Amino acid sequence: MSKENPNALKHMYDQKLLLNMAQEISLVHPSFDKKSFLSIHAPMLKLEMKDRVRLIRDQLKQTLPTDYTNSLKILLKSTNSGKLTGFNLWPYTEFIQTYGLDNTKISLEGLKHLTTLFTSEWAVRPFIKKDLKQTLEFLKICSLDSNHHVRRWVSEGSRPRLPWGERLHVFIQKPDLT
């Protein structure tokens, strides 16, 4: 039986991150239920990285307002201090791609913001699959953005075959679309 690697990336999704996330969200949404949010710590320890991200995503859904637009605004504002960056924000992009598919415009704006702090290239793919026309129109505008992270998001997010990302068969069949 092998010992677990204490340096595995999954360990970045730990109690410290949950506390930081709860603190930053509470600063912009004082009624945030920190206790409920933090209750996932023990179950999270048994999970691998992607499942930890999904658990945090789902707990955000449970503890934020039921209105998606309000929840998204809270999550985006919670990044303003700069204390949540990089892989810490993967649960946020997962939140958008899972719960924001019926709100394409504001979700894409949210992903555009988050991609300047952490990549959103995986999270944009469900929007491409669900609403190709509107998403491509948005990405075309973003391809001219002054921020190189946003331009990279457009090119990587629309790649037909992206490591760790689902295939975009429409672009495999019709590469001229991108």
Image: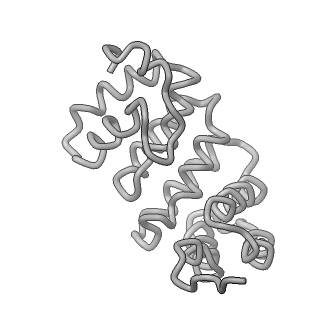
Q: Residue at x 65, y 81 (%)?
A: 15
In the rendered view, does 9 fall on the left or right side of 112? right
Q: Is residue 38 above or below residue 113?
A: below
Q: Residue at x 76, y 46 (%)?
A: 66
73, 161: nearer the viewer:
161
Quarter of the image where one finds residue 126: top right
Q: Is residue 24 above or below residue 64?
A: below
Report the quarter where the N terminus lies. bottom right
Q: Is residue 18 above or below residue 99?
A: below
Q: Is residue 102 above or below residue 35?
A: above
Colour scheme employed for the rendering of this structure? one colour
Q: Residue at x 59, y 41 (%)?
A: 97
In the rendered view, does 150 fall on the left or right side of 105? left
Q: Position of residue 80 (x, y in %)?
A: 42, 63
How many discs mark residues in the rendered view?
0
Q: Position of residue 146 (x, y in %)?
A: 19, 42
Q: Position of residue 62 (x, y in %)?
A: 78, 56
Report the quarter where the C terminus lies. top left
Q: Residue at x 40, y 48 (%)?
A: 113
Quarter of the image where one finds residue 161: top left
